[in-house]
Image (cartoon, helix red, strand yellow):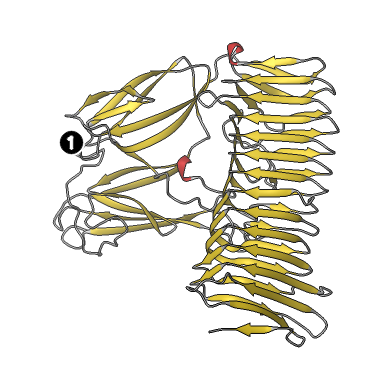
Amino acid sequence: MQNGYSTLYLRTTFSYEQVLDPRRLKLRIDYDDGFIAYLDGKEFVRVNAPGEPGERSPHNSLATASHEASRGPSGNRVETWYFAPDFPALFPHASEGGDPVSHVLAIQGLNRALGDDDFSLIPSLYLEKFFTEVTGNSVQLAGRISLVGASSVLVNGEVALLDFSAGTWSKTHTLKPGLNRLVIESRDCAGHVLASLTKDVLNKGTPRLVSGTLSSNASWDSANGVVELTGSVTVAAGVTLTIAQGTTVLFRPGTSLLTTSGTISVNGASNNPVYFLPADGETPWEGFAVGGAGSSLTLRFAEVVAGKIRLSDSANALLEDTIVRDYSYTAAGFEDYIAYALDNCLLTARRSVFSRYYTMAFGGQTTLHIEDCLFESSEHDFFKPQDTPGDSYVRRCTFAHSSVAGTDGVDTGANAAFTVDNCLFYDIADKAISIEASTMTVSNCLLYQVGTGMAIKDDSTAILINNTIANSTYGIAVYLKNAGAVFASAAVTNNIIWGNITNITLRNVTITAETDLIVKDADHPVFENVTKTIRKGVAPVREAVRE
């Protein structure tokens, strides 16, 4: 390499059968003198390298500063780099039912000068557990100070010790029993946050071990430390289990918390939530199972990690200010729902987050009242209602981020009656909203950067009012998909459909099947006044357009 070339390229592939959460990824690297690292083609760290972030560095580039590797004459410690919070989730499948995608880690290493007599580039990519478990009531934290202008480091608002000569910080942080969420911030002299990192640390202590049936009312709280399920816990009919704020509940593989005609009531607080976690920090558990008339599940200010929610047989569930995340597969590796409900259930969710999951589905006359929620990083369809009553709705929700082919935002099965109102859909590979054999009203929504904004198919009727669909492949598609379908109909009023490759399409129509698109706008001088019915396959009924 000396006097021959100044850069070296490394590239490797790996597979992982779940969504990779960048917040759990870390890169440890020993290097001399600089590097640029990419994951699946996206740059995530640049050290001592010329150019701006995202700019490719030529093969003959030089590092912008010297940096000795750990075994050099004045060696530096191996460094750890975490992914930025906005780095997109990484998906495992090329398409529905496809094989896992091979992720690509690529690194360009740079030497300081063509004549340098040493060069090192030794990277390792790690997937951390959902939390770090420690013994004792404190944890020793340490790190580097590398950002220009950084004058302080705080851990949950408490100031860490700084050593500017060594470029490091350290802090001994006191832990409460259970999960501790540590927010580590680097700030400038004016108090502005330059960078931040969140780390979850579990102080398990001596947990309270539980299993079996609760035959009388019971309470779990943080005063008794961590609760750990060694086997599934059943709340008997007519019995209430109350879980108080600040409680951490651990589930061993294969365990669940379930009831038939009982009550599970979880009451966290905004500054002291209840955590439900896999006991080993990584293996999915069986989740909540609630069934039978009179049964209910309430989750307020809770976080459910690697577990699911199942409702059946007239059960009710209320989720408020709750996070349900990181559940795509069972412990045996089978794809699974993060939430589903069947047979006359009621699911109400407000201000909650569903993140990094395979899919969720609801049917059997289950009523859905979903408001102000976030659905993100799905590997399959985000939300699948089927056979839902007409008073079901999704309001003021966001559906975002899926790179898996075939993924839809809202995808109805048969006989769904549904309202979608004031929602945002973006960065979805296939359809934002897909309606089949159902009736839906969609109003005041923004849909952009998706495959198809709205697809109205096979024996469906859609009313679309005051929506904006932009920067997608298709805006509105009305068509017949399967043999035997008779009609597909959409009434479209006061919508902006703009900047799509194809704004409106009607297709797959025969003389015996009807595909209707009725387009109307308000009588406004800025827009052409259009009152138009298009009926393909039969004679046009009415067409009046003023240019």
Closer-to-camera residue (441/125):
441
In the drawing, does residue 412 fall left or right of residue 313? left
Q: Position of residue 77 (x, y in %)?
A: 28, 35
Quarter of the image holding residue 3? bottom left
Residue 402 appears in the rendering: no
Residue of label 1:
74
Q: Residue furthest top?
A: 223
Q: Residue at x 61, y 11 (%)?
A: 224
Q: Which residue sits at x=53%, y=27%?
A: 270
| Above or below: residue 116 compared with residue 500 | above
Quarter of the rendering occupied by the N terminus = bottom left
What amino acid type is highlighted by mark number 1? Answer: Ser
Up-down: is 139 above or below 101? above
Residue at 62%, 38% in the rendered image: 350
- Residue 273, given in percent of the width and then of the height, sits at 56, 26
Nearest to the observer: residue 333 or residue 546: 546
| Residue 35 percent across, percent down from the top left | 28, 52
Question: Can residue 10 be seen in this snapshot?
Answer: yes
